Image: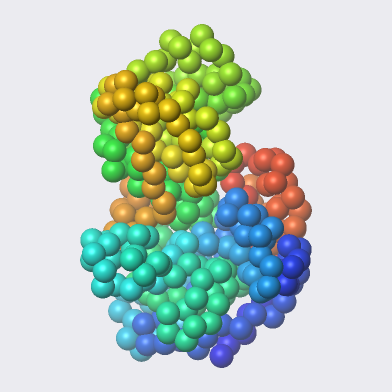
Amino acid sequence: MRTTSGWLAGENDPTLRRATLTRRDLREDDIAVRVDFCGVCHTDLHSLRGHRDTSLVPGHEFTGVVTETGPAVTRFAVGEPVAVGNIVDSCGKCAMCRRGQENFCAEFPTLTYGGTDRHDGSPTLGAFSREYVVREEFAYRLPAGLDPAAAAPLLCAGITVWEPLRALGAGPGTRVAVIGLGGLGHLAVKLSVALGAETTVISRSAEKAGDAARLGARELLLSTDPQQMAAARDRFDVVIDTVAVPHDLGPYLRVVALDGTLSQVGHLGSITLEAMDLLVGRKKLTSAGSGGRTGTAAMLDFCARTGVTADVEVVPSARVNEVLDRLSRNDVRYRFVLDLADLD
């Protein structure tokens, strides 16, 4: 086994404290990554608040540099910049894995933290640490030109909105609306605009109109203004809903165009809806989560070509508990990223 430093929450305690962490020795197809930057996701906050009888190291969207390779590794060399997301293994055999959708693995994918290693049964510890050991198949080359700090959130927030945008055909001639302008939403706007779609933001806050325009959106619709929402009825081919709390989908389904689709990617709990909101206009409701290896690699290449990265606030990792507190109050535009260099 090998050791590194990181930020660990003990049993029944959401506070992160610096600790010595244990990583596995490299297997034949493993690489060791020096973690330079790791995004902070709402999932990290929820996981810390919900964990009970086990220790937890969050962090599942990170960039860094390869420091060591196993003897069978062929895709990476020491010194190469890489990126890793929220999935670090899968069965590789089921129908979903064979289609390159490891995120939907029938045996459930191995998560970057809070998961169980498929080989030795040990719990996975996340990337709020200075080193991570991962199968080479679940690491991605970080394209030249992408800032490693601003690229880190692409590996969770970015792929989460990229998948439905691509699956639903967002592009020239398509009208896309993004509900919510936060960590997910701002990347959905950037990617939709870069894909060539006419893009609108739907928000409760008129104050975000300036940011929406800066990100490339054509306009901002106030979800709290009944007249604006009524005027947008049956207008959008694709609606990406990034709101992370329970909410009524009815008003948003009503702005979906004939045969259009609302994709719910923010709140993954129970929902209720009126069938008539789907029936009138043959509208569809769908969802998406993370992405497979093929889609993630394609997204990174697209972002490198178009210059899409997250709007980030980079913070030394020693301030991680302050960051989590601010995230709980939505005090960020639009993604926190931890700089792990202070763990040296």
In what quadrant of the picture does the C terminus appear? bottom right
Tell me where residue 56 sits by quadrant: bottom right
Is residue 309 visible to us here? no
Seen at 51% across and 59% down, the residue is 61
**Residue 273, how many percent across, how many down?**
45, 31
Task: Estimate the x, y position of residue 208 in percent, counting from the top left.
Answer: 59, 26
Instruction: State the residue lying farthest toward the front.
Output: 275
Q: Residue at x 32, y 20 (%)?
A: 280
Please indicate whether residue 119 sits to the left or right of residue 97 in the image.
right
Residue at image x 70%, y 46%?
Answer: 328
Q: Is residue 57 above or below residue 313?
A: below
Left or right of 304, for residue 6 = right
The N terminus lies in quadrant: bottom right
Q: Quadrant of residue 13?
A: bottom right
Rendered image coloring scheme? rainbow
- Circle count: 0
Q: Is residue 38 visible?
A: yes
Q: Quadrant of residue 166?
A: top left
Q: 104 above or below 175? A: below
**Residue 221 point in image, percent of width and height:** 50, 19
Query: Where is residue 200 drawn, in percent x and y?
Result: 44, 24
Q: Nearer the viewer, residue 257 or 133?
A: 257
Q: Residue at x 56, y 14 (%)?
A: 225
Residues 285 and 289: in front is 285
Q: Is residue 20 above or below residue 266?
A: below
Viewed as shown, does residue 225 lie left or right of 11? left
